[in-house]
Every structure is written in structure tokens, then in C-alpha cells.
Image: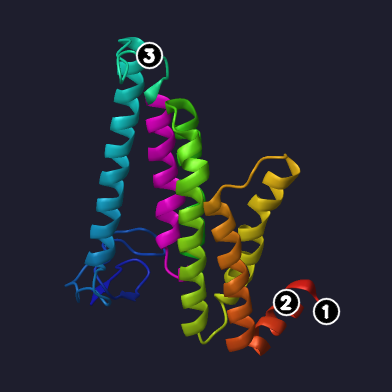
């Protein structure tokens, strides 16, 4: 064990300086008390590496688009670099955050679908497939999300997924209400999405009625 010649204390581990006076310790090191977290260090390096790659792509795309005037496709007036930057930054700071420890599966599925649909809606608006996104892709993705939340709520013993299952009813009905208020005919996919949301809500009441009531009371403070 190393010792400090000035403070007359013993210092374990691989410390090189005295924690009191910062003088150089004398003696033989005992080695580390705790093993190094090599896995965490490796994950940290990989995260920094992919973050660096993301910013390389973003800066290069902005430079090629705005400084060189190269468009993709060449006849398009849309600045593709802004769309690409939006996707990469959202992936880095929104989607990747959903994989943190402690994040529930239902929350992960719900947030990822919402984020991706938001990005896809903006992209489709500028690239000309907005109706395809709103009439087909969005309702199909939301329907899949609701079914996934229903399955997770059925197998979740802690009840953490139940709140996302209850939001299925709102998510499924709200688009139909918006289309009705705006006097637009609801596409068949949105009608199917709404019906599935109601069916899943009824299924939740049948299979886990007490949990559903308890979750509603807890959320509404009643």
C-alpha cells in the first residue's frame, strides 16, 4: 500500500497522489479495488463514434446542398439536406433515447411510432406523397402500435403498459373526429383504425377490467 511521506496516511488502490496534500505517494500499488467497466467504456466510444458520423453526414449534406447546389433529385427544389438533417438529428436525440434502461416497452413503441410518423409527414409533404402517408402509412402504423400496446398490456404484470393501452382509444378516434370536423371523408384505413381501437379497449375491459378502472382513477385522481 502506498503512503504519503508528509501526511503519514496509507492510500489504497492505484492513486499516485495524496488525496490531502496532492504529494507524490511512495510505496507499491495494491492494484485497483474495483474492476474497470470495459463494456461501458466500449459503449461510450461507439456512441461517440456514431454521433461523430451523424454530424459528418449532416455537415457534408448541408455543404453539398447549399454551397455546391447539388440537389437530389436534380429537378427538385427541395433542400434534401434539411430533410436528411431532420431525420438524423431526430434519430440521434429522440429515437436513440427510447432505448435507455428503465424505458418501458409500451412507451418505447408509442414514442418511436409518433416520432417516425411526424418525420415522415414532413418529408412526404415536400416530396409529394403526403396523401399516401396520411391515408395509408399513418393509420396502418397506428393500428400496429395499438395492437402491440394491447399485447404488452396483457402480459405486463406491473400495469405500466396499461396507460398506453388506454391512449389507444383516443389515438384511434381522434383522427376520425378531426376529419369529420373538417368535412373530409374518412378513408377506409382510418375507419378500420378507429374500430380496432374500440375493440382493443373493450378487450382490455374484459380481460383486465380492474386494472383499467384503477388506471383511470389514478390518472384522473378520482
Q: 190 or 54, which is in the foreground?
A: 190
- Quadrant in the picture for the N terminus: bottom left
On the image, which quarter does residue 183 sit in?
A: top right
Q: Which mark is residue 216?
A: 2
Which element carries disc 3, helix, strand or loop? helix
* Number of the front mark, 3 or 1: 1
Residue extending furthest toward the top:
68
**Dot 2 and dot 1 residues touching (CB under 8 Å):** yes
Q: 154 or 205, which is in the foreground?
A: 205
Alpha-carbon span between mark 3 and mark 2: 51 Å
Q: Position of residue 56 (x, y in %)?
A: 29, 31
Q: 118 or 103, which is in the foreground?
A: 118
- Which span is picked out in magenta? 81-105
Which element carries disc 2, helix, strand or loop? helix
**Looking at the image, which residue is at 59% across and 73% down?**
199
Q: Position of residue 192 (x, y in %)?
A: 55, 60
Q: Which residue is mark 3?
A: 66
Which element carries disc 1, helix, strand or loop? loop
Q: Is residue 176 above or below residue 167?
A: above
For marks 3 and 2, the one nearer the N-term is: 3
Q: Which mark is residue 222?
A: 1
* Number of the front mark, 3 or 2: 2
Q: Is residue 147 magenta?
A: no
**Looking at the image, which residue is at 32% across and 24% down?**
61
Give the left or right position of residue 163, taking residue 31 as reference. Answer: right
Classify 10 Å Cα crowding around label 3: few (below 14), some (14-19), many (20 and above): some
| Residue 118 in view in this figure | no
Alpha-carbon span between mark 2 and mark 1: 8 Å
Colouring used for the render: rainbow
| Residue 100 in view in this figure | yes
Give the left or right position of residue 193, taking residue 82 as reference. Answer: right
Amino acid at each position: 500500500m502506498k503512503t504519503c511521506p508528509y501526511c503519514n496516511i496509507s492510500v489504497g488502490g492505484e492513486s499516485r497522489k495524496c488525496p490531502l496534500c496532492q504529494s507524490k505517494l511512495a510505496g507499491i500499488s495494491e492494484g485497483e479495488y474495483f474492476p474497470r467497466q470495459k463494456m461501458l467504456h466500449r459503449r461510450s466510444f461507439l456512441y461517440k463514434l456514431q454521433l461523430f458520423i451523424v454530424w459528418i453526414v449532416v455537415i457534408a449534406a448541408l455543404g453539398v446542398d447549399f454551397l455546391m447546389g447539388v440537389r437530389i433529385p436534380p429537378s427538385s427544389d427541395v433542400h434534401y439536406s434539411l430533410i436528411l438533417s431532420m431525420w438524423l438529428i431526430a434519430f440521434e436525440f429522440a429515437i436513440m433515447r427510447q432505448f435507455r434502461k428503465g424505458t418501458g416497452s409500451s412507451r418505447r413503441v408509442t414514442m418511436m411510432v409518433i416520432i417516425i410518423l411526424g418525420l415522415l409527414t414532413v418529408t412526404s409533404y415536400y416530396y409529394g406523397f403526403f396523401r399516401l402517408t396520411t391515408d395509408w402509412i399513418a393509420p396502418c402504423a397506428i393500428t400496429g402500435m395499438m395492437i402491440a400496446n394491447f399485447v404488452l398490456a396483457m402480459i405486463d404484470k406491473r400495469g405500466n403498459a396499461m396507460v398506453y393501452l388506454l391512449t389507444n382509444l383516443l389515438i384511434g378516434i381522434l383522427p376520425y373526429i378531426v376529419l369529420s370536423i373538417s368535412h373530409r371523408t374518412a378513408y377506409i384505413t382510418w375507419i378500420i383504425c378507429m374500430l380496432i381501437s374500440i375493440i382493443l379497449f373493450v378487450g382490455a375491459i374484459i380481460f383486465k377490467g380492474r386494472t383499467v378502472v384503477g388506471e383511470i382513477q389514478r390518472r384522473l385522481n378520482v
